Image: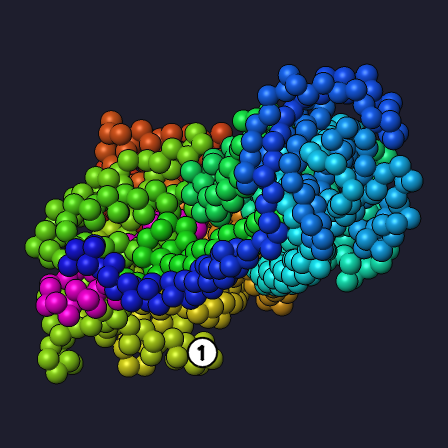
Amino acid sequence: MSKRGMNRLGKSRFLSERKFAHHHVLAAWQSLAIFCLFLFSHACSANALPIDYWCGELPGMATASNKAVASEPAPVNIQSISWQSAVDGSMRLNPQYAHCWIRLQQVPRAPQQLVISNGWANVDLFDAEFHLIAKGERILEQSPESALNNQVSRSSPDYAAGVLSLNHMIFAVDPAWRLPLYVRIATRSGGLIIPNGVQVESAEVAQLMEQNRQQSNISLAVAVAVLLTAFVCLAFGITLKDTAYAWMSAYLFLSVVIRVFNPFEPLIFSLTAQFDLARLVSRLMYPIINAVWMLAYARIADFAHFAPRLNRLAKWTAVLFLLEIPLWLLDAPLGQSINFSLILFLTYPVLFCGCWIAWRGGNRSAGILLLSNCMLFIFWAPYQLFGLWPIPLFAKFIVSESLSSLFGVTSDLVLPLLFCIALALRTLELKQAAVRLMSYDALTGLANREMIRRLGEAMLKQGQSLAVLVLNIDRFRAINATLGPQIGDQLLVVAGNRLSALSGVLSGAQVGRLHADQFCLLWPDINSIPQLKQSIERDFAQPIDEHGQLVDLSLSVGIASTDDTDQSQKDGKLDMAQLLRRAELALESARQQHQQWMHYHPDFERARRADLGLLSELNRAVEQGELRMFLQPKFNFASGRVDSAEALVRWQHPQRGLVGPIEFVPFAEQTGRIVLITQWIFVSAMRLSADLRAQGSALQISVNVSAVDLNKPGFVADLQNLCAELGAQASDIRIEVTESAAMHDPNAALQIMHALRDVGFSLSIDDFGTGYSSLAYLQKMPVAELKIDRSFVRDVVAGSDAAVLLESTIVMAHRLGLSVVAEGAETAIEWNLLKDLQCDYVQGYYLAKPMPVEEFLRWRAAPILLK
């Protein structure tokens, strides 16, 4: 089966997970559809009036500016003016001029009123002789509702007062006014450029109030929708413990606050009568919400990861927004002008660039935010083309009645809507990540044990022959302890990549990580296993360079295949779980026998069951004295005598006879029962050493301890008590610690070894060269002896590379002040070479095999005869 075929296994689950996220997307787009229906169904009840307009100062009007506030007519020359006509009553202000003028040839009749739709501009109304007949100013000191109720009190004996209602400047038309009428509109208010849309209409006040009431309801609905979205974001942030959602929630909450307390929004009329408080809160909220907006975008798009410099710039921009607060309180137009400048020249470029980089880097939420920015930025692009400042995101200062409904609702709903889509995509990503974690290893990206099992089952169902290889990295625990977990993780990744490259050679081959340092390879072509073995050995023969540290990787491999028929199965077929278990049994046997490759054999099952039986009987063996101590002599080249020996354990089983340590010691270490054996061997060795010293024939006896023994609480104190109890001297006992046991937990092992040395025991590093200790650790260890593993001695001849390595090890140990013991010398050539290399002690079958204590004592008393 191909890898593409294997990927279909999770397709149905993936599709079902996508439906969950799609429901959020559909709900969001349904809200957008309702919003669009509202926009298209909302028709303006006002009627447009045809106008003529012109921007600039009317000739003579500048010199008569002081008279413009009096009843005297201004001597204005309008003959040279080139008026532009607009039948639809709309015009665009030109900020290059201080004022723009509108000429009205007709005016509405009662009960309709003259409506100038631009809530920002100050408007003056003149009759045909340029008498100032009405004046409309922005409401800054009282609520629009109060202004409507007090229109008469605001009028002057010389002119009438226009009333600002939301975005409309309303003038009650006097039939005595002489036509044409002239409307002067200021394009600036302080340092602020007025939004440039102006609409001249006629409408009844009651109609306008009804529109305001409808828009108030819409504003309330928008505020509720945004508030609900904020609570959803907050819930997600608390559940997922993600501050990005918290920032977005804060932004949405502030959006609601600024809508509620905006004195020029109809929503405030029904919620508060404190206009001054609303104005204060509104001015405080604008710089704060812009700062939170900046930080929320930077956090959601993960600027810190994708664009660190832009992330810092975003934070500084937020600080600048906050520094605007005094300006907003002291001089609102100046604060607004600086605010617009920051948004135009700093905020939008930073957000565009940051979101683009994050989106290109794989952050889909950044793409959604980029889209929302583009939509709002393009909305105000015409203003930039005409040289005007853009209105900021979610601005509450609007242009006309039509743009008020559109932009006010759009600004509050677009980002929550797009955020809901981003939330849905995020939910989908989390679901996909959860599914992936269930099937793939997070570190290497390879299939995990469950996924390997499913892939193997799929192959077996198709009738394919299959070989299952379980591969283990040798000495990985020691590597991890010595070089650190980061290097260990890198080695696992490299090993996974090398195995993945090998699996790509054969169609259908799969590789996975079962756990820790154990991998699995599914190989459909059983006949090519020999070639696969060569490829693995070739690829893993190359060391790995991690931060200047060269690390050799070697593998132990257990193999099981469908060719291994199982008579216990009715159909003779194996399932994937059985193949995995058999491969792991083969791997376990390979490691016990120090083999790199081992194919499954039925004897492993029987041996495993027998081993389990032995383990269950081990307690009884210790209690009933079935264990036997054997001694293997160590020959001292300098003295020509045997003054030390290594204690080894055997089991005299009632039914199975003499059982060797290889059959029960490894399993005893795995189950922790090795401490029973260690305790027994120490008692036997100490009792014997005490007896021999009393007889005047002292013998130093070496006892092996495992990592389990070293980690046993009170290990040192127990040995001290045994020495005192049995009358033995600690110096007569040499404790051998294997290199791998010492590196299991180097720091803890060093503490235990120093404690043992301090109470008088001598220490030896056993099997040196098979573990992964460094010279730095060897220098720290309080050892007196170094035992070279038999693999460095076997078949070595003078002049070979192996002899050079052996000699360098002996020289190094001597320079460190250690005596050297060579294990496994079985021939005269090896014996003589070790003597020539000035090795201190030798141990092996060439001298003598391990013997029971009585036999050893007789052998030691007799002259030493070499073969």
Nearer the observer, 664 or 312: 312
Q: How far across and down, in percent of the image, does residue 778 sit?
A: 51, 39
**Residue drawn at point x = 71 percent, y = 26 percent:** 99
In what element is the residue under mark 1? helix
Viewer-proximal residue, 635 or 42?
A: 42
Q: Quadrant of the N terminus?
A: bottom left
Q: Quick check: 169 left or right of 228?
A: right
Q: Is residue 854 above or below residue 326?
A: below
Counting from the top left corner in percent of width and height, residue 325 is at: 80, 38
Task: Residue at 24% x, 29% y: name it.
Answer: 800
Q: Is residue 331 visible?
A: yes
Image vertical order of residue 796 relative to residue 564, above or below:
above
Residue 456 within the magenta-colored segment of the rendering: yes
123 lies left or right of 46: right
Q: Nearer the viewer, residue 4 or 162?
A: 162
Position of residue 252 relative to residue 106, above or below, is below
x then y, percent, for residue 113: 71, 49
In the image, what residue type sits under mark 1?
Asn
- The chosen color scheme is rainbow
Q: How far across and down, in percent of the image, does residue 412 sit?
A: 61, 52
Seen in the image, is 246 located left or right of residue 357? right
In this view of the protein, can residue 216 be seen by the observer? no
Q: Quadrant of residue 440?
A: bottom left
Q: Residue at x 11, y 63 (%)?
A: 465
The region drawn magenta spans 453-478
Residue 746 higher or lower than 84, as above or below: below
Q: Label 1: which residue?
A: 619
Magenta segment: does it hold 6? Answer: no
The residue drawn where x is 79% and y is 20% is: 75
Decide: few, some or many residues near mark 1? Use Cα within 10 Å; few <14, some 14-19, many ≥20: few
